[in-house]
Image (cartoon, helix red, strand yellow):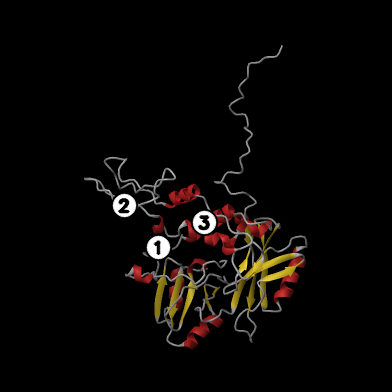
Amino acid sequence: MLNKNKQKAPANAPQLTNKGPSSKKPSPFSFANTECKLSYDAQVSNREVPKTDLINSLFFDLRNLQVTEEQLFEAIQDDIMGIAYRQESGFLEVTFSEQEDVKKYLTEGLTIDDKPIIPLPPRDLKPRILRVKLANVPMHLSKARLEQDIKSYWGQYACVKAIAPYTYKGTAILTRRWDLIVYLKPEANALEAPVVWEYQGSKVLATWRGAPASCLSCKSAGHYSSVCPTFPPKRKTTETLKKTISKHVTSTPETNTHNDETLNKVPLASSSKAPIASTSKATTTPGATNIPPVAPQQFHTPPAQLMSYASVTAAGDLFTGNSLDQEMRDQYYEQEYNLNQNLTSASESPFAGDDEQMANQYLPPDNDEEMTL
């Protein structure tokens, strides 16, 4: 006789679900778990420098600096005339009395603590040392063969000084991404090379500082992924956007106590009809420290801008070769953005001035969609 009484499973019995991996713990297959070991001493930045109206100036990328800011200050203080410290963007702009001094710094660089430092020229001067980033490289050939073919191809346009693939940390497992360091040929003023390369049945995409637009979605030149007509990027739903906004809102400091916890709360919408935030009026409560509502546009980088950056970096597509996954790109670039915010505080940096607002003025690039280092 069958026993119809259902027996409860032990509390410690494993539960089978269809849920994917937890978002809190990155997948071991994530591109964040890769590294690129370039055998090149200097760190070559691909970040676009800010606009400037200064003459005889050049830039240092403080986010990719291999020495401390104090060491850099000591090394350059006797050669420069002025400093424009752009803390929020992570750039240091310095000026010289003569254009020849600028050219000398750009061609020779400087060495600090046995580490070569390469400054960045302003936008009207093209850099002569570039980091070229490749995506969608095939993987059915050996690493040695791929390296040989890539060097041979790019040797037509520049002098290849270093090359390396992105591999999973601690392994020799390849991804579809490679980086190379190139020097412009003596007769060249800029790197003039195609951004799409047909190789072994794949369309390899390349980008570098000042490169023409290319699309990681349809693998073609002339536009970016964010405006791809063939594969338009997915847009976040209202609810997903609200969650993203809520995550970026700074929590109330512990020192701000309230008589009534229900008052003075930021009106982050709990329903689709409620407004996300209001900037019209702050609630006044006697005896309490009042905090005005926080509007989305007050965030340092709004979710829309994060999506724009992510649509170009396209971390998922770089090792899958398939159509881009917008959510993966958002997560990847948002993590990278958060890491980039760990900058030296103004009080600790030797370049910080008294007028922080003026010192940190930053004019964004004409196009924020270039893949950055």
Depth check: give the residue in front, 360 or 311.
311
Disc 2 residue crowd, few under 14, some 14–19, many 20+, Cα 10 Å: some
Read off the residue under disc 3. 334
Q: Quadrant of residue 54?
A: bottom left
Q: Quadrant of the C terminus?
A: bottom right
Q: Earlier in the sequence, mark 3 or mark 1?
A: 3
Nearer the camera: disc 2 or disc 1:
2
Amino acid beneath label 2: Pro
Q: Earlier in the sequence, mark 2 or mark 1?
A: 2
Vertical placement of residue 16 versus 152, above or below: above
- How much space separates mark 3 and mark 2, taking CA atoms? 26 Å
Q: Which mark is residue 345?
A: 1
- Relative horizontal placement of residue 355, taking residue 243 as reference (left or right): left
The 10 Å Cα crowd at callout 3, few under 14, some 14 to 19, many 20 or more, is some
Q: Earlier in the sequence, mark 3 or mark 2?
A: 2
Secondary structure at badge 2 equals loop
Identify which residue is drawn at 59% across, 53% down.
328
Q: Is residue 215 left or right of residue 292?
A: right
Contact check, label 3 and label 1, Cβ < 8 Å: no
Left/right placement of residue 74 relative to residue 154 reads left
